Amino acid sequence: MIELFTAHTAELDDVTREAARALLVEEFVDLTEEDWEHGLGGVHALLREDGVLIGHASVVQRRLLHAGRALRTGYVENVVVRADRRGRGHGAALMAALERVIRGGYELGALCAADQAAEFYAARGWQRWRGPLVALGPRGPVPTPEEEGEVFVLPGAVPLDQDGRLACDWRDGDVW
């Protein structure tokens, strides 16, 4: 039996939190401590099959700056489906749960997608950001051209110029 549920980080018991981390480590061998931390403090979508965790994704609040506005953004992190369960709609179910959270609580959704996931997000209505990207570092704006083409947004009520500059708040590890 497949079970999808959402919970805030604070509501996850230690067993579930560690199972999510183990799944991410198993599927992403280069997962860093910062990568894991980026997905904490928000809402998690979790997918269990017969009591075993097979999928995870989270959305956390970030501030993205665009066209003179600081936008309350639901930023998607740590999306994973166990390799032997992919291609069955599980990723779509996880994202549908997070997209409801984003549409209900944020002005904008955003994520940084690996090349192999770009088509998946685009098919769900996420749009590739075309303009320049920067991170607001401790010493000012830091261009992040290596991320251009990998950042996607889920537009909300705020008008966007997707050829304009988009800036993210600073954080350790990958800023996008």
Image: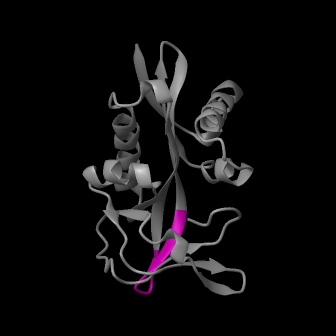
Residue at 49% across, 72% down: 64
Residue at 56% across, 76% down: 144
Marks counted in the figure total: 0
User: In the figure, 139 relative to 173: above or below?
Assistant: below
Q: Quadrant of residue 26?
A: top right
**How did the renderer colour the structure?**
one colour
User: Camera-side residue: 113 or 103?
Assistant: 113
Q: Please identify the dominant SS of the magenta region.
A: strand
> How far across and how far down the image is residue 67, in percent?
40, 85
Q: Is residue 61 left or right of residue 69?
A: right
Q: Is residue 127 visible?
A: yes
> How far across and how far down the image is residue 45, in percent?
48, 37
User: Camera-side residue: 27 or 135?
Assistant: 27
> How far across and how far down the image is residue 30, in percent?
66, 47
Q: Quadrant of the C terminus?
A: bottom right
Residue at 46% across, 24% down: 84
Q: Within the magenta stretch, is there residue 51?
A: no
User: In the figure, 114 relative to 163: above or below?
Assistant: above
Residue at 33% across, 77% down: 162
Q: Quadrant of the N terminus?
A: top left
Q: Is residue 103 left or right of residue 30?
A: left
> How far across and how far down the image is residue 110, in percent?
43, 61
Which residues fall within the magenta stretch?
62-70
Q: Is residue 47 visible?
A: no
User: In the figure, 1 relative to 93: above or below?
Assistant: above
